[in-house]
Image: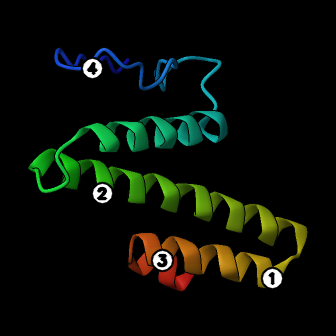
Amino acid sequence: MVVARWPTSGRVLGKRRVHSESLTYNQDVIIPHAINALRRLLEILDPAGREAVLVRREIALAESKVSVKQGRDQLAMGDYTGAEKAFAKAYAAVPSRKAALA
């Protein structure tokens, strides 16, 4: 379980607990909510600060995961052009050999 406290902020960034060992954990639901919470956190942080860089990197990784999942789903349905676009979007977010080969 991930618990974070920001003593200087009274804003609620997200209301979902992330616990990957839970039987009800569903990555398709959790990751988009986490991306939204991280974007709200990014609005609060100093854009030039180290924390903002880390949050932007985490957002890019999460968006890449979502795009790879969409690409795999489209491949399973036989939509090869849609899958190619989703994999290209994932590679643009986080360049990696795995996404390039997909």
Identify the image quadrant of residue 39.
Answer: top left
Read off the residue under disc 1. Answer: 80
Q: Residue at x 17, y 19 (%)?
A: 8
Q: Residue at x 78, y 77 (%)?
A: 82
Read off the residue under disc 3. Answer: 91
Read off the residue under disc 4. Answer: 4
| Position of the N terminus by quadrant | top left
Q: Classify 62 as above or below 70.
A: above
Q: Secondary structure at mark 1?
A: helix
User: Which residue is at the front of the view, 12 or 65?
Assistant: 12
x%, y% of residue 31? 54, 40
Tell me the CA gap for discs 3 and 2.
14 Å
Tell me the CA gap for discs 2 and 1.
28 Å
Q: Which mark is residue 57?
A: 2
Are the residues tagged 3 and 2 within 8 Å (C-beta)? no
x%, y% of residue 19? 46, 21
Q: Amino acid at mark 1?
A: Tyr
Q: Amino acid at mark 3?
A: Tyr
User: Which residue is at the front of the view, 11 or 76?
Assistant: 11
Q: Nearer the viewer, mark 3 or mark 2?
A: 2
Q: Amino acid at mark 4?
A: Ala
Viewed as shown, does residue 86 lie left or right of 48?
A: right
Query: Please, which colouring scheme is shown?
Result: rainbow
